[in-house]
Image (cartoon, helix red, strand yellow):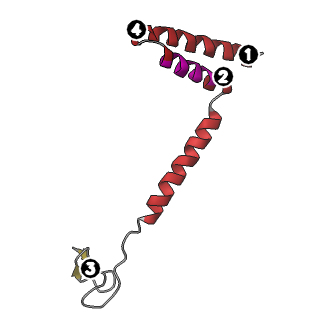
Amino acid sequence: MVACGECGTEISTKARSCPKCGAVVPHAKIWPWVVGVPVVLAIAFFLYGFSIPEYKAKAMEVRRVCERIATPDQRYVCDQQYQQAIEDGLAKSRK
């Protein structure tokens, strides 16, 4: 139950209008959430993607490829390759 914004009468949250004064009860709109949240998330991921340095993106790709090939007990090799790709990228970016 909520109070009517016009006359203050207590009315149901499901009511479309106040039974006493007839004032329309505003309801929260869901479409801004349905449309807005995905758009904001897409923009955030887009901006995040451009903020990743190129060498780091390449190092992550090296790791992904290695993890597809390596067995679970060889994953340490993927970590080593990733670290080496990061170090190489940092060295090239400093030049």
Mark 4–mark 1 CB contact (< 8 Å) = no
Mark 1–mark 3 CB contact (< 8 Å) = no
10 Å neighbourhood of mark 4: few (<14), some, or many (≥20)? few
Q: Earlier in the sequence, mark 3 or mark 4?
A: 3
Mark 1–mark 2 CB contact (< 8 Å) = yes
Mark 2 element type = helix
Q: Which residue does the image show at 59% across and 38% down from the upper left?
A: 48
Q: Earlier in the sequence, mark 4 or mark 1?
A: 4
Q: Quadrant of residue 72?
A: top left
Mark 2–mark 4 CB contact (< 8 Å) = no
Q: What amino acid type should be assigned to the residue bearing mark 4?
A: Asp
Comparing 72 with 10, the one in front is 72
Q: Which residue does the image show at 56% across and 15% down from the upper left?
A: 82
How far from the left and from the top, in percent, is residue 22?
A: 31, 90
Which residue appears farthest toward the right when viewing the image? 95
How far from the left and from the top, in percent, is residue 39?
A: 54, 53
Comparing 28 with 20, the one in front is 28
Between the residue at mark 2 and the residue at mark 4, the CA separation in whole angstroms equals 26 Å
Determine whether 39 is above or below 94 in the image: below
10 Å neighbourhood of mark 2: few (<14), some, or many (≥20)? some
Query: Mark number for residue 15?
Result: 3
Between the residue at mark 3 and the residue at mark 4, the CA separation in whole angstroms equals 62 Å
Residue highlighted by disc 2: 55
Q: What amino acid type should be assigned to the residue bearing mark 1?
A: Lys
10 Å neighbourhood of mark 1: few (<14), some, or many (≥20)? few
Query: Mark number for residue 73?
Result: 4
Residue highlighted by disc 1: 92
Q: Is residue 2 left or right of residue 89?
A: left
| Residue 9 forms part of the magenta stretch | no
